[in-house]
Amino acid sequence: MKKLLLACLNILLATAVNAQIGYQVGDLASDFNLKNVDGKNVSLASYKNAKGYIVVFTCNTCPVSKAYETRVEALSKMYAVKGYPVVAINTNDPVASPGDTYEKMQERAKEKGFSFAYLLDPDHVYTKKYGAQRTPHVFVLQKTAKGNEVAYIGAIDNDQQEANAQRDNYVQNAVNQLLKGEKPALTSTKAIGCTIKWKKEVSK
């Protein structure tokens, strides 16, 4: 009986730990310093006049990420001038996903005319730190006196294939409310997309 109780307790503890992986709404997100497709390193601090950030964990190869590229670009055009630049981070290991090499990222950015930074996270350091699970997975950050506070986590909208003109634009709504000095009414949704292609652990 004691063994059974201990096993149940371990399962509950593991579930609780897994549920808390990555940032939650209200947490302060750490900055990063990652290589952009133009060869220069970019951090959140690079955007001196930012009021916040739209951080999009994405990749080259996921069909869902590809379906959202135009909308991510639209977010960049819409909000960079208002103080909320888009910063995209490629989550995928290029060995596990050859279409996600740095060179392929450069090709994709040029082909699609990205106006936003597209950064490489080669060892998944910030993918794991933020808690991104899918591509795309968005974290809207608000710049505060305390630091970059997570204001929204989840999907861009509820329309993967851009087929619904009446879709709920979660990220747009969140940023618009922040720009008005309000907290987002909806702070989290489920990110729908491809699983991240993690680097294989080298056995010792």
Image (cartoon, helix red, strand yellow):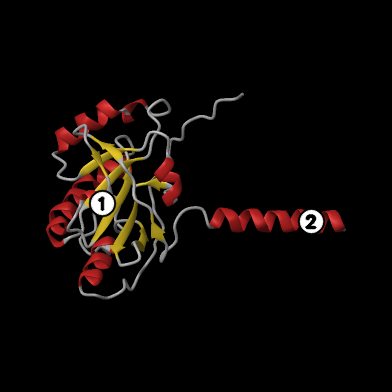
Q: Quadrant of the N terminus?
A: bottom right
For badge 2, the amino acid type reads: Leu
List x then y, in percent, for residue 93: 40, 32
Crowding around mark 1 (Cα neighbors within 10 Å: few <14, some 14 to 19, many 20+) is: few
Q: Residue at 77% across / 53% down in the picture?
A: 7
* Extreme-right residue of the structure: 1
List x then y, in percent, for residue 113: 13, 39
Q: Nearest to the eye among marks 1 and 2: give it.
A: 1
Q: How many marks?
A: 2
Q: Is residue 43 above or below residue 140?
A: above
Q: Residue at 47% across / 31% down in the picture?
A: 199
List x then y, in percent, for residue 69: 22, 45
Residue matched to label 1: 45
Q: Residue at 25% across / 26% down in the picture?
A: 103
For badge 1, the amino acid type reads: Ala
Residue matched to label 2: 6
| Residue 98 location, quadrant | top left
Residue nearest the observer in this picture, 30 or 184: 30
Earlier sequence position, callout 1 versus callout 2: 2
Inspect this view and state whether residue 195 appears: no
| Residue 99 location, quadrant | top left
Element assignment for label 2? helix
List x then y, in percent, for residue 96: 43, 28
| Residue 29 location, quadrant | bottom left
- Mark on residue 131? none
